[in-house]
Amino acid sequence: MKQPAIEVAVSLAQKLGYLLVATSDARGLPHVAVAAKITLGKGKGQVAVETWFCPGTMANLGKNPLLSLIIWDPDTDQGHQLLGRVEKMEDLTILDGFSSELQGRAGWPQAERRLFIRVEKTLRFQRTRHTDEEE
């Protein structure tokens, strides 16, 4: 893990306004979700990602804390993949049935959450040829 590569990736995600979060369940079945926000964490090598995570993402992380964060600008084909482990989950906002729009819709997220992730490896992510060597 190289801190400068993490900082560049976070900056790109903030500019784009989104990033992808890839998780897998205990059997290895993958799931990809979109998150709205990423910031640098308090410690070196840590980032915080927050959004209204879908139930599939949260169920996977309950059984398997490993994930991949993908930040990619398709216009420039520049991107990064941050491989890591969720160290802590924090509830930010809980609707708990307050939203009449979501009431009665099973599986709709009712909590906005923040994930604190320890980045273990940083890789380039792009559609052109590239290696999976750490940045």
Image (cartoon, rainbow, N blue to C red):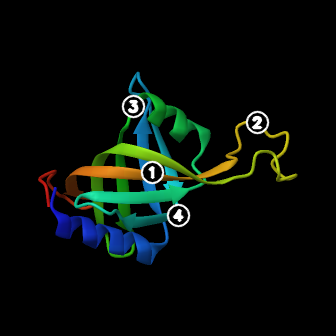
Q: Are marks 3 and 2 in contact (CB under 8 Å)?
A: no
* Label 4 SS: loop
Q: Residue at x 82, y 53 (%)?
A: 99
**Label 4 belongs to which residue?**
36
Query: N-terminal of the two: label 4 or label 2?
Result: 4
What residue type is disc 3 on?
Asn
Q: Are marks 1 and 2 in contact (CB under 8 Å)?
A: no
Q: Which mark is residue 115?
A: 1
Q: Residue at x 34, y 69 (%)?
A: 10
For the C terminus, the quadrant is bottom left
In this view, 36 is above or below 108:
below
Q: Which mark is residue 64?
A: 3
The Cα–Cα distance between marks 3 and 1, rounded to whole angstroms, is 14 Å
The Cα–Cα distance between marks 1 and 4, rounded to whole angstroms, is 12 Å
Query: N-terminal of the two: label 3 or label 2?
Result: 3
Within 10 Å of disc 4 (Cα), the crowding (few <14, some 14-19, many 20+) is: some
**Label 2 belongs to which residue?**
106
In this view, 106 is above or below 1:
above
x%, y% of residue 15?
42, 78
Within 10 Å of disc 3 (Cα), the crowding (few <14, some 14-19, many 20+) is: some
Query: N-terminal of the two: label 1 or label 2?
Result: 2
Q: Are marks 4 and 2 in contact (CB under 8 Å)?
A: no
* Label 2 SS: loop
Q: Is residue 24 left or right of residue 78?
A: right
* Label 1 SS: strand
What residue type is disc 2 on?
Ala
The Cα–Cα distance between marks 4 and 2, rounded to whole angstroms, is 22 Å
